Amino acid sequence: MKQFKIFVDGNWIDTEDKLEVLDKYSQEVYAEVAKADEQTVDKAISSASSAFEREKLSPAKRYQILHKASQLIAERKDELAMLITKEAGKPLKQARSEIDRSAETFLVAAEEAKRIHGEGVPVEAASGSENRLAFTIKVPVGVVGAISPFNFPLNLVAHKVAPALAAGNAVVLKPASKTPLSSLRLAQILDEAGLPKGLLQVVVGSGSTVGNQMMKDERIALYTFTGSAEIGLKLKQDTGLNRLILELGNNSPVIVDKEADIDLAAKTLAAHSFAFAGQVCISVQRIYVHDSIKDLFMEKLKEQISALKIGDPTDAETDVGPMISEDEAKRAEEWIQEAVDNGATIAHGGKRNGALLEPTVITDVTKDMRVVCEEVFAPIASVITYNDLESCIKEVNQSDYGLQGGIFTQNIDTAFYAAKRVEVGGFMINDGSQYRVDLMPYGGVKDSGNGKEGPKYSIEEMTEERLIVMNLKE
């Protein structure tokens, strides 16, 4: 069994209380991690606050550190990918992709550290201000509290830590209790890359203890959180006027138009609905198919799903591994059964073995079923037919969420009609809702949150604009 310490004030700290991290496929204990108590969390925040005041890194130095971290992540791809596969149950080929993306996230953040700038403000155009010169600068906010989820235990941490450091902030990171190991390895990498002591703290523990303590600490200037809408709302209520970047829930809709490339749609949606067992905020959950092509689409979709390999995530050929826990798999199974009890039909899959749930397609659903209107966060997709695009979009928009969505169509007018009307933060044409590259702006509307991720856009959130006005002599 592997042993991990937490990272506080530039030191690796052990504690008496331990957190067990399970191998999500075998359900055996894979590692033990030191748990932070109240005093340790307070020390971490104090250290971050002191480091922010003490360490004023130039943009060039921030670039060097983050660029080096990117290189180290890429060099340790195999080790880090297997760590993610063990702690999260993510299939190895998807874990390797996450490492590639994490390295790129750090590289993009490094580059953006050199591009932070203000702008000139023409105050001299105002009567009586002819002798004044004004411009803005961007300054870091201070200490950033980062709370990350289990589903991308390295890359979603990278999306919080790398931009925060690029902007000149200090960070206190609380990773998900089920997947803290990647974050601790990242702390080791940043330490090796030359990050000064105190600018990154990693504290491990439950949201009800460590997370709540962080929420109530006035020394944290900005919170960046990825998780459920319920916890996001609590964070907003508990943190007063502090700045927030919230990436919350979703139940991604994708429309398959009568003029779609059906082969492309079926292949893409089979992959995008069930990658990492559907435990991705932008996994395809609601598929709206024009009734004139439903039978052909369903035939091709089931062919593509049948080709997916389910099982041991350490097998390089596996496409769908276990869910994060058996309890979550049972919860998803209950949602399927609830839908069936109310008239839905299982068109494919539906069986569970421990934490493994088969990729499942449900038809004959209604919009008030939980598999449709709530975030399922499991390998479950519902297929809904429509015959009028305007009515379809109205139904799509009845969701409380609005992170990403999409449409498959070869008609450009139809594509742009939908793009302008579907209420989401990102809309994909001839692609699944799960499309994301790490330099793009990423964020939602409604209960899907506020603020943007993507290093350039996060840096905007993680800096303050300061106006400077000079009164010049004539």
Image (cartoon, grey):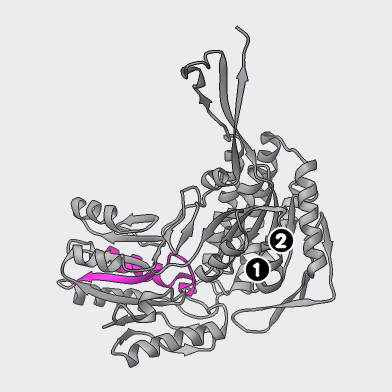
Q: Is residue 269 visible?
A: yes
The spot of residue 237 in percent (x, y) is 58, 64
Q: Kindly check if marks 2 and 1 are in contact, taking CB atoms under 8 A apart as contact.
A: yes
Q: Amino acid at mark 1?
A: Leu
* Residue drawn where x is 29% and y is 82% of the image: 365
* Residue drawn where x is 57% and y is 81% of the image: 325
Q: Is residue 279 magenta?
A: yes
The spot of residue 444 in percent (x, y) is 43, 58
Q: What secondary structure is found at the residue carrying circle 1?
A: helix
Q: Amino acid at mark 2?
A: Arg
Name above or below for residue 34 compared with residue 333.
above
Residue designated by label 2: 185
The single residue placed furthest to the bottom in the displayed view is 341
The spot of residue 50 in percent (x, y) is 80, 48
Find the magenta span and give its range. Answer: 262-290
* Residue drawn where x is 78% and y is 58% of the image: 44
Asked if residue 196 lies left or right of residue 242, the reply is right
Residue designated by label 1: 83
Name above or below for residue 404 compared with residue 303.
above
Q: Which sits in the foreground, 405 or 400?
A: 400
* Residue 261 position by quadrant: bottom left
Asked if residue 104 lies left or right of residue 294, the reply is right
* Residue drawn where x is 31% and y is 68% of the image: 398
- Mark 1 closeness class: few <14, some 14–19, many ≥20 residues within 10 Å: many
Asked if residue 248 lies left or right of residue 161, the reply is left
Q: Earlier in the sequence, mark 2 or mark 1?
A: 1
* Residue 415 position by quadrant: bottom left
The spot of residue 341 in percent (x, y) is 34, 93
Q: Which sits in the foreground, 102 or 374?
A: 374
